[in-house]
Image (cartoon, rainbow, N blue to C red):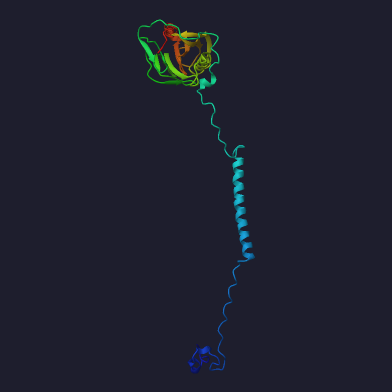
Amino acid sequence: MSEGTQTSTAAWSRPGGPWASGTVTAQGVPPLLPPPEAPPEPPGDDGPRRRRRQMMMFGGVAGAILAIGLTIILAVVLGSDGDPFGSQASAPTDVRPPLARMCPAPTVPPSAGPTGKPGPVSPVTGERTTDTEAGISYKKYGAPWVPWDTVWRAGTLEVPYKVGQHFVTEVYSGGTYHASILSAAVPAADNDAVTLNLECVGRQVAADVRAEYYPQPNQLESLRDEMTTLGGRPAWVSEFRLHFKSPGLTATDELSAVAIIDVGKPTAAVLYVSIPGTHKQFDYVVEDVLKSVRPL
């Protein structure tokens, strides 16, 4: 400290230090008092004010959350075309195959065509094509016919042709064109059905053939559309010639037949025969192979 402000030695020698009572400085000036203690902290607001402040804070947070939630809901409603919760389509109640749905089994036997038990059939000779899944066999032909070696699912009904014969009649810009004798099994009734609606199934398959297997548009020349028997089994046969044009394709017509045969199962046997107009020498095969059908 600076000169003239030093305290006396006696003042510093007393017990208690320079702030003991009665002590003075050398200049006779009372010593400085200690600074007052800081006022105690006010008690915490744990009363009504704290609760009021907490309520205000909670209200602000809740309001912000509510505003965000309302914004999200509004965005979902405006962007969902009137279906804010994205309702899922209900599960289908009818799980039957397409042909079974389109052609329910008749409540009474058809008035036209054969009824009752299959009649006797004449024995067959020569080579046969056997389709165990379809439940039928039919005549097998020599060259140029060759075995069918793939699965062809054509049309809306996707009839799975796995067995038969064919040969290529021409190659054009669209691929290859074929003459064919193909068979398949199609689910056509409920599992417990004992009678097939052959006419309905036959017409549906024939319509699918015309619409999906051939160039569009085409003209139909119907030759045969009737209930009959094939190999002693009830059957519906549609026979027709289609007329059409397609760029690069030489053939402009084709003789075709679709036979739906009741083989005593919920699945019907399908026999599809097609002979392009460029190979009319094989037209006889249509009637010949239909007559050769036998159930297994």
> Residue 224 appears at what percent x and percent y?
51, 8
Q: Residue furthest top?
A: 122
Q: Residue at x 51, y 20 (%)?
A: 100
The answer to whether 237 is drawn above or below residue 192 in the figure is: above
User: Along the line of sight, which residue is nearer the eye, 155 or 126?
Assistant: 126
Q: Is residue 255 visible?
A: no
Image-quadrant location for residue 84: top right
Place residue 88 in its image quadrant: top right
Tally of numbered discs = 0
In this view, 254 is above or below 12: above
Residue sitting at x 59%, y 42%: 76
Of residues 120 and 112, the one drawn nearer to the viewer in this rendering: 120
What residue is rendered at 38% in x and 13% in y?
129
Residue 132, image x and y in percent? 39, 17
Query: Would you say 17 lies left or right of 68 here?
Result: left
Q: Is residue 186 visible?
A: yes
Q: Position of residue 86 (x, y in %)?
A: 57, 38
Look at the image and tell me in which quarter the C terminus lies.
top left
Locate residue 291, reporting x and y percent: 43, 7
